[in-house]
Image (cartoon, grey):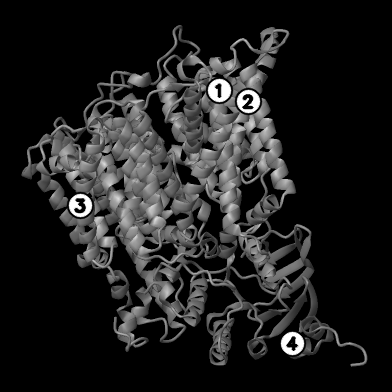
């Protein structure tokens, strides 16, 4: 288990880690999420699938505090997330990656990761200005921890790569970096928004294994938005299908994949007589 | 650039080197220089040079200029925090500078009768500066970023206005109206800077005081940069949403940068007040604001060595240029260098100069023959080169009026020339343009040095943003549009 | 209280006059911000140049104190030429100082705008010196002309300002609401890329926006000269700031908001000057700005801009 910079975590037992209760959200006249409820158990990998525009990213944004739901409640670790600011929610233990990658491109690889340690560190203004020993120790710890998070990805993000600007990374490496950065916030729940997007089958396989490792070795609970069904099928404990902001199926991958509502949502309805 | 090893480790590892080298040699060299020495060596170098200056010259004017550079550097570092690190466009920054100055005036002069020791005053100034920063920043940051610009601009203006006009304020309990600010004539006879028994009295004394503070602030900002705060500010500047999502409290961070910037500005204001020995509302006008912005833009937002370089350029060069002949020489030099740098192949610039000279040599006799009574000569100056140029130009009798028109024509022509695609047409168009440029310089621009200087600052900002948005020392940045 | 009520109509007239000028300036800011998300700091200086163009026309057509043609035509010419000149100036500024920076970091065009503003101010100072010029309005409009309502006087000059402004605003509203260009402008303001994909020539729309906004500022400059007579190279700074404030108060990017903000600001300022003290006229504008933004951070009529993640 990776070393921790901050203190220990509070656990609530026998409760879902995350629970969405009748969440609704509309933008202007468009109802994007409608009466959505589901829960996520600690240690599980839940996938959200659905055609484009189904509201999957919106759900992620609602959980992480980018948007506030119009109705309903979101409970995380027995606390309501409503009304909280984005960074507060991150502090509570929820981290995410972005569909279109939002790295700090002009900062180096290691800095990208180190920056995310902010909420877990304590050096105050005076300690920073005076460069006290406790400040230096903390900086060392941050750097070490960042290297550890990056080491999760094997050889790719190591050595000389650490000081390269993030914009010099390949696409796949950028995705990995974003995950490493999210992990630096020491989350309990990790939300991955299409981590395998734009990857070839080899890389997708790696992503699948990686997600499993994140759960097994780092003890994370994971919600995954993905279109690549091999990844979804390869790693999910449970799958929820959305369409037009409504939950249309829930269960194991096989159950959901063969559910006729889901098939209809993706492929359209079979015409009678054909 | 070797194409064959792409992807191999050494090639990737030398990425940094290649990107800073760039295709233009001098910029790469400049950028590489900053990585040449370890940071502490740079600090030592700056201190060494700084200390050496008064030892090398006893010219008070030069020392005063050096002191100004140090003062502007401190101010610019404060603004760099706000604009360069946190990405907030604070257009009222000079108001904090003014607040620092006036607080020093209140606490160290006969105006209020209070004469606090300098150290105490400085601490108070820093605290109040930060408080004002929080006060102004707090509501403003709720707004969309651009609104901050207008609110801070208003604040800056109001500050100057209040300081100018609060001369007759009716305070309950006093029979006569109170002069709160000294009005346009400011507050004078401020105490000298005095710390631990040392009292600054000469220009050199104040220079050292400013140098010390500059190094201190440099150190402080450098430490801030290399900490979780610095990383957070940089993240915030890169992508505010992502920074929030990674647990960084962006609003608080912006506020902190704002307040720290204000505190630094206040401190420099107090130092300025003690140096000048007085404060006037006119010290804190928009021209100073543009100057400080030009400094950080020139040096590259967020870059510390850039701030030093920018301060030197923006303070020293105008001072140097006060000498009109020198200014003229440098002006022509600048044109020559720019043309050589931008016109390729190189022989073109040489051809252009020859063409322009010939053009002038032909034009003048033609004009004077057509209408000899419309032309005259400009007075001789101390510089042989300038006299040569003036003799070469055809100077109409009403040089001033014609010069004004020529200025307008010049602006239009330059804009047109930059639009021309065909390089041959451009070449031909440049001939009368350069002639006109020289004409306008000799008849108008060199006659009004203070206005010309401001004109150049304006043009500099525009040109910098278009061609070098990251400043002279800036590294290539990738921007997400 | 009696004096308050007695003075009220007069202050309202003053406020509307001032407000008209602010509104015209504010419109240019709002329109440009709407399509480009750019705060055009040089806008106030465009207004200043408009005032000078009007001055130039006036001087040319009234040599030695005798108007060459009927005053009403002179005024019309002043307005038209100033609007045309400023419109072209605005387009030139956009082409040379802002367009190259379309894909630059957000701060770049703002700083470039600062540079343009500085350049314009000092170019005028260089060529025309820093001395004040005065519109000889008395040669165009007899000083005594006006309308009397009891104790309140509506001078012809102020009536002219208000009327011209209303006319311009009606024309603008028609343009924005009823013409294809107006529709294109609104589309670009909402989503530039989508508009481009719908076949809107975004560059042309932006040019048109700058032209119209700057022309309005030019008109404001002439009107200011007519009423307040004094023009000088630095006049654009404070007026620009106020116009800016008005645009923000009304909700930047919002055209009716700019009009509302302008008149509101003008009235508030006149009331403050008339009933409190002239010394703080500029401070009042700032205070109004802060109060409005505290209560409604998006301005009075401003719309929320949703963020796409």
Residue sitting at 76 percent across and 61 percent down? A26
Q: Marks 2 and 4: same chain?
A: no
Q: In which quarter of the image is residue B337?
A: bottom left
- The image's mark for residue B342 is none
Q: Is mark 3 on a helix, strand or loop?
A: helix
| Dot in front, 2 or 4 | 2
- Judged from this view, the residue extending furthest toward the right is A273
The disc placed on residue A252 is 4
Residue position marked by numbered label 2 in the rendering? C161
Which of the 4 image quadrants contains residue B453? Answer: top left
Q: Residues within 10 Å of mark 3 (few under 14, many from 20)?
A: few
**Residue B365: percent from the left, percent from the top?**
20, 42
Q: Is mark 4 on a helix, strand or loop?
A: loop
- At horizontal 58% and vertical 42% (from top left) the residue drawn is C213
Instruction: Assign a secondary structure to mark 2.
Output: helix
Chain letter for the residue marked with disc 4 in the picture: A
Please state which of residues C129 and A122 is positioned toward the viewer in this rendering. C129
Q: Name the residue under label 3.
A: B358
Give the labeled residue for mark 1: C226
Above or below: residue B238 compared with residue C63: below
Please say if the residues under marks 3 and 2 sit with CB atoms less than 8 Å apart: no
Image mark 2: chain: C
Are there few (<14), some (14-19), or many (20+) residues within 10 Å of tag 4? Answer: some
Chain of the residue where label 1 is placed in the rendered structure: C
Name the residue: 13% across, 52% down: B48
Say whether residue B255 is left or right of residue A130: right
User: Seen in the image, is A52 located left or right of residue B293?
Assistant: right
Does the residue at mark 2 contact the one at mark 1 (Cβ under 8 Å)?
A: yes
């Amino acid at each position: 288990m990776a070393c921790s910079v901050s203190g220990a975590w509070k656990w609530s037992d026998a409760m879902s880690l995350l629970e969405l209760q009748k969440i609704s959200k509309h933008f202007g006249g468009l109802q994007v999420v409608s009466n959505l409820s589901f829960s996520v158990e600690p240690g599980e990998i839940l996938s959200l699938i659905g055609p484009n525009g189904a509201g999957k990213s919106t759900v992620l944004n609602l959980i992480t505090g980018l948007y506030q739901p119009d109705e309903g409640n979101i409970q995380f670790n027995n606390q309501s997330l409503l009304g909280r600011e984005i960074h507060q929610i991150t502090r509570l233990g929820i981290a995410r990656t972005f569909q279109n990658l939002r790295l700090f491109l002009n900062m180096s690889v290691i800095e990208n990761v180190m920056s995310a340690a902010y909420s877990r560190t304590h050096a105050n203004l005076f300690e920073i200005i005076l460069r006290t020993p406790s400040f230096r120790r903390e900086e060392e710890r941050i750097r070490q921890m960042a290297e550890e998070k990056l080491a999760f990805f094997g050889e790719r993000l190591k050595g000389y790569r650490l000081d390269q600007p993030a914009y010099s990374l390949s696409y796949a490496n950028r995705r990995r970096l974003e995950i490493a950065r999210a992990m630096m916030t020491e989350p309990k729940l990790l939300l991955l928004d299409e981590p395998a997007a734009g990857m070839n089958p080899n890389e997708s396989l790696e992503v699948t294994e990686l997600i499993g490792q994140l759960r097994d070795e780092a003890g994370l609970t994971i919600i995954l938005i993905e279109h690549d069904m091999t990844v979804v099928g390869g790693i999910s404990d449970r799958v929820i299908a959305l369409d037009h902001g409504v939950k249309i199926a829930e269960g194991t991958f096989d159950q959901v994949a063969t559910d006729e509502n889901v098939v209809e949502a993706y492929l359209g309805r079979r015409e009678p007589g054909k | 650039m070797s194409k064959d090893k792409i992807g191999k480790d050494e090639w990737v590892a030398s990425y940094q080197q290649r990107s800073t080298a760039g295709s233009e040699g001098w910029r790469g060299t400049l950028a590489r220089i900053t990585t040449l020495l370890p940071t502490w060596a740079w600090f030592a170098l700056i201190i060494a040079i700084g200390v050496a200056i008064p030892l090398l010259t006893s010219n008070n004017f030069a020392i005063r200029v050096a002191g100004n550079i140090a003062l502007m550097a401190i101010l610019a570092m404060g603004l760099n925090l706000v604009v360069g690190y946190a990405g907030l466009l604070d257009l009222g920054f000079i108001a904090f500078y003014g607040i620092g100055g006036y607080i020093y005036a209140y606490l160290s002069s006969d105006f209020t009768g209070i004469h606090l020791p300098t150290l105490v005053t400085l601490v108070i100034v820093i605290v109040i500066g930060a408080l004002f920063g929080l006060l102004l920043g707090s509501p403003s940051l709720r707004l969309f970023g651009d609104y901050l610009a207008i609110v801070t601009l208003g604040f800056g203006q109001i500050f100057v206005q209040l300081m100018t006009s609060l001369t007759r304020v009716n305070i309950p309990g006093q029979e006569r109206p109170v002069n709160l600010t000294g009005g346009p004539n400011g507050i004078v006879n401020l105490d000298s800077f005095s710390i631990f028994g040392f009292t600054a009295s000469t220009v050199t004394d104040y220079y050292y005081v400013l140098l010390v503070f500059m190094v201190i602030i440099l150190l402080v900002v450098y430490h801030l940069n290399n900490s979780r705060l610095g990383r957070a500010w940089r993240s915030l500047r890169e992508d505010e949403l992502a920074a929030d999502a990674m647990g960084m409290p962006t609003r608080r961070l912006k506020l902190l940068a704002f307040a720290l910037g204000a505190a630094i500005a206040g401190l420099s204001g107090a130092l300025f007040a003690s140096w000048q020995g007085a404060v006037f509302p006119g010290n804190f006008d928009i021209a100073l604001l543009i100057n400080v912005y030009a400094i950080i833009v020139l040096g590259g937002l967020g870059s510390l060595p850039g701030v030093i370089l920018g301060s030197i350029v923006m303070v020293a060069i105008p001072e140097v240029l006060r000498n009109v002949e020198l200014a003229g020489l440098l002006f022509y030099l600048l044109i020559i260098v720019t043309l050589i740098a931008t016109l390729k192949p190189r022989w073109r610039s040489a051809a252009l100069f020859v063409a322009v000279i010939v053009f002038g040599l032909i034009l003048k006799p033609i004009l004077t023959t057509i209408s000899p009574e419309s032309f005259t000569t400009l007075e001789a100056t101390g510089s042989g080169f300038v006299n040569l140029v003036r003799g070469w130009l055809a100077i109409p009798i009403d040089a001033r009026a014609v010069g004004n028109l020529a200025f307008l024509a010049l602006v239009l022509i330059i804009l047109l020339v930059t639009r021309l695609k065909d390089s041959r047409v451009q070449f031909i168009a440049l001939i009368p343009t350069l002639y006109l440029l020289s004409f306008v310089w000799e008849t108008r621009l060199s006659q009004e040095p203070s206005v010309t200087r401001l004109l150049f600052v304006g043009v500099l900002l525009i040109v910098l943003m278009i061609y070098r948005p990251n400043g002279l020392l800036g590294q290539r940045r990738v921007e997400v549009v | 209280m009696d004096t308050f009520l007695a003075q009220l109509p007069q202050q309202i007239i003053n406020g509307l006059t001032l407000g008209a000028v602010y509104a015209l300036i504010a419109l240019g800011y709002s329109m440009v911000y709407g399509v480009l998300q750019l705060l055009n700091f040089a806008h106030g200086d465009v207004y200043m140049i408009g005032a000078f163009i009007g001055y130039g026309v006036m001087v040319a057509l009234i040599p030695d104190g005798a108007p060459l043609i009927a005053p009403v035509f002179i005024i019309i010419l002043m307005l038209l030429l100033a609007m045309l000149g400023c419109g072209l100036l605005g387009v030139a500024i956009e082409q040379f100082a802002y367009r190259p920076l379309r894909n630059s970091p957000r701060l770049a065009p703002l700083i470039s705008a600062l540079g343009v503003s500085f350049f314009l101010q000092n170019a005028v100072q260089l060529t025309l010196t820093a001395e004040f010029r005065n519109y000889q309005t008395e040669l165009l409009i007899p000083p005594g002309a006006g309308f009397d309502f009891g104790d309140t006087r509506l001078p012809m000059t102020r009536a002219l300002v208000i009327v011209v402004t209303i006319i311009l605003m009606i024309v603008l509203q028609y343009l924005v609401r009823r013409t294809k260009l107006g529709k294109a402008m609104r589309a670009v303001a909402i989503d530039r890329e989508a508009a481009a994909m719908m076949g809107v020539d975004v560059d042309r729309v932006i040019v048109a926006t700058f032209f119209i906004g700057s022309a309005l500022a030019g008109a404001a400059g002439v009107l200011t000269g007519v009423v307040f007579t004094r023009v000088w190279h630095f006049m654009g700074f404070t007026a620009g700031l106020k116009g800016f404030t008005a645009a923000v108060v009304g909700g930047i990017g919002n055209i009716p908001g700019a009009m509302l903000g302008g008149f509101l600001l003008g009235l508030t300022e006149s009331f403050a000057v008339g009933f409190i003290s002239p010394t703080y006229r500029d401070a009042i504008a700032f205070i109004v700005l802060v109060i409005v933004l505290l209560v409604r951070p998006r301005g009075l009529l401003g719309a929320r801009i949703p963020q796409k993640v």
